[in-house]
Each structure stands twice: as C-alpha cells, then as structure tokens.
Image: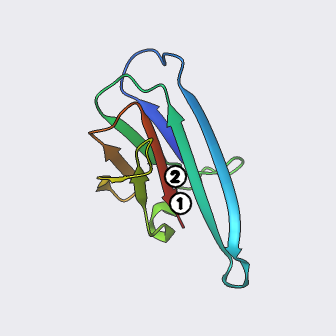
Amino acid sequence: MIFIFLALTGLAHAQKISYLVSFPNINHHEATISLTVTGLTQKTAVFRMSRSSPGRYATHEYGKNVYAVKAFNKSGKEILIDKIDGDVYTVNRHDGFIRVEYI
C-alpha cells in the first residue's frame, strides 16, 4: 500500500509528489516504496496510509504490514519520522524536501 501525503495547509503550494516502487525481494513478496515530496512550505508533513481499497468498504490495516520506515532530506541525510498511529507518520523538521522509504 502506498502512503498518501497530506499537507497541513489549506492549499498545496507547488508541491511535487513522486513514487518509486521496486521489488528487490520478490521471492518474499516484498516491495520497496520510495515517496519523494518537494516544495514543502508547512512545518509538519503528515503521511497517512490508506485504510481501504477501491471497490471495498471494509477497513484494512495495511499499516501493520509496513516496516523499515525511514525519511531523508535533500542531501540524503536520514531525518526523524514519527509514527503517531498505526498508519500515520509525521516529519516535523525538513528542508522542503522529504523522501520516505519503506518495505
């Protein structure tokens, strides 16, 4: 499942969001997801994983299957990402660029 980026401002100001999905461990049915967000102006960035899928109304707990969650700044330095709920993460200090990676 892929994270949805939520801006805490009323309007998204020229933010660019891109995803990269790879399968380095396909034998174990694992995908590595990289989400890059640029042009951030708000202090706190919130990342939320979907709890449902198209065509189904049941709630799913996709977040419980995600691990190795890391965040990086523009220079590639790892920055703090906080898990505040089973499927919600926040990054409070960033340089307008955040790359989140997870398996």
Query: Image quadrant of residue 86?
Result: bottom left
Q: Is residue 64 above or below residue 44?
A: below
* Image quadrant where one finds the C terminus: bottom right
Circle 1: residue type: His
Q: What secondary structure is marked by label 1?
A: loop
Image coordinates of residue 39 in percent, x first then y, are: 48, 25
Give how far across and how far down residue 50 sits, in percent: 53, 49
What residue is shown at x 53% (from left), y 24% (from top)?
15
Residue 78 in the image, given as x and y percentages of width and height: 36, 55
Q: How is the image coloured?
A: rainbow
Q: Residue 75 got which mark?
A: none
Residue 103 appears in the rendering = yes
68 relative to 22 in the view: left or right? left
Mark 2 is surrounded, within 10 Å at the Cα level, by few (under 14), some (14 to 19) or many (20 or more) other residues, namely some
Identify which residue is drawn at 37% across, 20% down: 9
From where the camera sits, is residue 1 visible?
Answer: no
Q: Which mark is residue 51?
A: 2
Which residue occupies the foreground of this view, 2 or 36? 36
